[in-house]
């Protein structure tokens, strides 16, 4: 079902969001020596490497060019044994669904025990303010279920799982080595800072805003620099920028203001995502001055 759902999203969402400056994915490339990114249309998946181990964060769409783009970054799919899943939407789990190419069939997937209720069918994922049910996700990968605040250590990589419900009931973000926060669909970056993620795609927008405020308090209490890396926009290392509009939600029904000159007209147009750039150009932070 995932490949069909992925292609359906590409057609429908490309038409619906053109010119609105909502989806602003990073291109394939590297943020630094630890973090690499693969662009899949409007979505980003990430790879964190340390001490010879590479962990994948989210599994994207059921996307035919994933292996090709991983080769641009010299990452072997067979080396991936651990995949952190922020949430189970079609554009975050496609590569581990049953009808995918099976690039990661031997990898364990990690997700919150609450989010797993979507995978078991106990709960159905609803979008468009609860009016539309997404297809149920089916995966054969081994699952490791997590609780809020749980700490993992994978080959010397420290991972803290933090529950941020709202976009989905069991959405998690992952703080890796106390420095890199992978936020999935918790935060959306506008030209002048971060908002709660897209209104029409949330299970509960009020809960999402509360989760964002709690996340800010958590991060500021650590008193250390943190790179905040989003699933559909860019990355930033200023918490003032990241949480500038934490009490507001990105409105998916109108063109965004202020105008963002870096936003693509159609986020599904990948013509500027090239192997040459992936290997030569670092992905710049969004809050740069």
Image: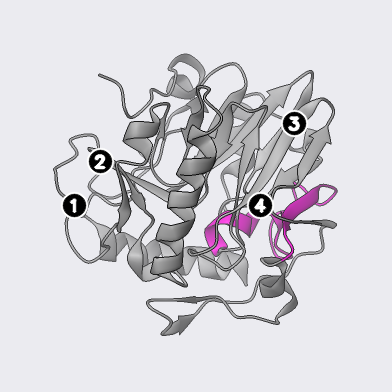
Quarter location, residue 127: bottom left
**In this rendering, is residue 80 above or below 92?**
above
Secondary structure at numbered mark 1: loop
Numbered disc in front, either 4 or 2: 4
Q: Does residue 72 appear left or right of residue 158 in this picture?
A: left
Is-magenta flag for residue 167?
no
Q: Does residue 101 appear left or right of residue 58 in this picture?
A: right
In whole angstroms, how far apart are the C-alphas of marks 4 and 1? 28 Å
Residue 20 at x, y = what percent? Answer: 21, 55
Which residue is drawn at the image coordinates 55% and 56% (left, top)? Answer: 164
Q: Are marks 1 and 2 in contact (CB under 8 Å)?
A: yes
Secondary structure at numbered mark 3: strand
Residue 9 at x, y = what percent? Answer: 43, 66
Among numbered discs 3 and 4, the one appearing first in the sequence: 4
Among numbered discs 3 and 2, the one appearing first in the sequence: 3
Q: Disc 2 marks which residue?
A: 263
Kindly identify which numbered label has been placed on residue 256: 1
In whole angstroms, how far apart are the C-alphas of marks 3 and 1? 37 Å
Residue 82 at x, y = what percent? Answer: 78, 42
Quarter location, residue 47: top right
Which residue is drawn at the image coordinates 44% and 59% (left, top)? Answer: 210
Q: Are marks 4 and 1 in contact (CB under 8 Å)?
A: no
Q: Disc 4 marks which residue?
A: 85
**In this rendering, is residue 27 above or below 251?**
above
Kindly identify which numbered label has been placed on residue 158: 3
Estimate how packed mark 4 is, as few (under 14), some (14 to 19) or many (20 or more) residues with alpha carbons within 10 Å: many
Provide the residue span drawn in magenta. 90-113
In whole angstroms, how far apart are the C-alphas of marks 4 and 2? 26 Å
Among numbered discs 4 and 1, the one appearing first in the sequence: 4
**In this rendering, is residue 49 above or below 214?**
above
């Amino acid at each position: 079902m995932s490949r069909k759902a992925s292609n359906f999203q590409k057609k429908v969402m490309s038409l619906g969001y053109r010119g609105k400056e909502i989806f602003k994915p990073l291109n394939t490339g590297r943020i630094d020596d630890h973090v690499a990114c693969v662009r899949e249309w409007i979505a980003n998946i990430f790879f964190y490497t340390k001490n010879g181990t590479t962990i994948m964060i989210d599994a994207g769409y059921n996307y035919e060019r994933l292996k090709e783009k991983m080769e641009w970054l010299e990452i072997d799919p067979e080396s991936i044994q651990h995949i952190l899943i922020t949430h189970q939407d079609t554009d975050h789990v496609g590569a581990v669904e049953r009808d995918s190419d099976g690039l990661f069939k031997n990898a364990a997937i990690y997700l919150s025990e609450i989010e797993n209720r979507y995978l078991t069918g106990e709960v159905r994922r609803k979008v468009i303010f609860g009016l539309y049910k997404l297809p149920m996700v089916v995966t054969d990968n081994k699952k490791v279920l997590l609780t809020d605040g749980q700490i993992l250590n994978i080959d010397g990589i420290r991972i803290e799982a933090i529950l941020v419900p709202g976009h989905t009931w069991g959405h998690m973000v992952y703080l890796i080595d106390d420095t890199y926060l992978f936020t999935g669909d918790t935060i959306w970056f506008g030209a002048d800072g971060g908002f709660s993620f897209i209104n029409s795609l949330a299970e509960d927008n009020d809960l999402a805003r509360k989760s964002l405020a709690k996340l800010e308090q958590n991060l500021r209490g650590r008193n250390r620099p943190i790179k905040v890396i989003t699933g559909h926009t860019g990355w930033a290392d200023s918490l003032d920028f990241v949480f500038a509009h934490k009490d507001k939600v990105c409105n998916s029904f109108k063109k965004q203001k202020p105008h963002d000159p870096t936003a693509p007209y159609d986020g599904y147009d990948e013509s500027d995502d090239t192997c040459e750039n992936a290997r030569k150009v670092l992905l710049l932070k969004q809050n740069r001055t």
